[in-house]
């Protein structure tokens, strides 16, 4: 029997209804679903054993929005479990599947009609007074940001330990190519396709005219050091988990060498079609082979 890991946004009724539908379909197809502890309790599924040595799961299906997919990515980052997302959220850059055709799309994956996209993750190490206090991994981004008061913070940035700038701003985003269409794009950063081996640093509302987004290579390390005396400074992980920073903490960020997230793409899917659809780049579809105007 094929086993599929099911990760669901249980706060959305549309996601729960689709999960129940897939579970019923799976019983007819002799497909077994397992789930993390929270979902297993909600859906009445067997709980997936994260400690098992031989992984019985073929792939994971994520039902929700991009936030649910980011949560799922942290779960599977240490396991060889590729993820396929079905979108019941809003924009959906990571969850591209159609809920109306969910069974058909899973059948295609089971038949082998898909590609695997290896997506880079960021590794962030927080050092305080010479001691390592946090090691974080993120599929989208790591962000230094201020607290709720409307005050700028100053952040020193270094690349490969060479001084780059002392930036007064609301914060700084360091993003993977996957995250370049998320918060970094909203802050004016460039779009990097997921196969590009790079990361991008984007200031948030900088109080200076010289600050610009910067694309860096896969071998580079970005170091960010808060210099302000402001008490409320935070480091956020994929916009979902937060860690309070102290003045003069050093956050070293690089492309992770030991972790990545595998995502499933159906053979008919294309990243640039996805960009055009999600960002609404024109309303007229161009037929293949049609001459340019």
Image: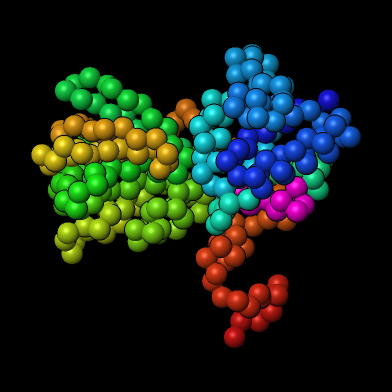
**Nearer to me, 205 or 38:** 38
Find residue 233 and report its image quarter.
top left
State whether residue 273 appears in this view. yes
Image-quadrant location for residue 85? top right
Disc count in the image? 0
Left/right placement of residue 215 relative to residue 157 reads right
Please state which of residues 153 and 250 is positioned toward the viewer in this rendering.
153
Residue 66 pos. (x, y %): 54, 47
Residue 216 in view of the camera:
no
Residue 47 drawn at (x, y percent): 66, 21
Residue drawn at 52 percent across, 65 percent down: 279
Image quarter in which the C terminus is found: bottom right
Which quadrant does the N terminus fall into? top right
Residue situated in front as seen by the camera: 183 or 78: 183
The segment highlighted magenta reads 95-102
Q: Position of residue 291 (x, y in %)?
A: 66, 81
Check the image and name the residue furthest to the bottom. Answer: 293
Q: Residue at x 19, y 32 (%)?
A: 246
Is residue 134 covered in magenta?
no
Vertical placement of residue 214 versus 158, above or below: below
């Amino acid at each position: 029997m094929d086993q599929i890991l099911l990760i669901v946004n249980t706060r959305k009724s549309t996601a729960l209804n689709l999960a129940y539908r897939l579970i019923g379909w799976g019983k007819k197809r002799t497909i077994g679903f397992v789930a993390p502890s929270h979902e297993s309790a909600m859906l009445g599924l067997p709980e997936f054993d994260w400690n098992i040595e031989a992984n019985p799961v073929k792939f994971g299906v994520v039902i929700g929005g991009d936030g649910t997919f980011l949560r799922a990515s942290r779960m599977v980052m240490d396991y060889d479990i590729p993820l396929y997302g079905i979108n019941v959220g809003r924009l959906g850059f990571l969850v591209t599947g159609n809920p109306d055709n969910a069974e058909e799309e899973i059948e295609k994956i089971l038949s082998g009609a898909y590609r695997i996209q290896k997506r880079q993750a960021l590794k962030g190490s927080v050092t305080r007074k010479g001691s390592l206090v946090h090691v974080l991994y993120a599929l989208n981004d790591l962000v230094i940001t201020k607290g709720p008061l409307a005050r700028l913070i100053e952040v020193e940035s270094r690349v490969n330990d060479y001084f780059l700038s002392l930036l007064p701003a609301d914060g700084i985003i360091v993003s993977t190519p996957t995250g370049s269409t998320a918060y970094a794009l909203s802050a004016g950063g460039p779009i990097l396709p997921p196969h590009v081996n790079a990361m991008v640093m984007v200031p948030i509302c900088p109080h200076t005219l010289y600050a610009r987004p910067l694309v860096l290579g896969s071998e580079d390390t970005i170091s960010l050091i808060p210099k302000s005396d402001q008490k409320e400074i935070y480091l956020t992980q994929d916009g979902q988990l937060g860690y309070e920073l102290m003045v003069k903490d050093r956050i070293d960020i690089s492309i992770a060498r030991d972790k990545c997230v595998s995502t499933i793409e159906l053979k008919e899917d294309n990243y640039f079609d996805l960009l055009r659809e999600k960002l609404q780049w024109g309303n007229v579809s161009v037929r293949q082979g049609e001459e340019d105007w």
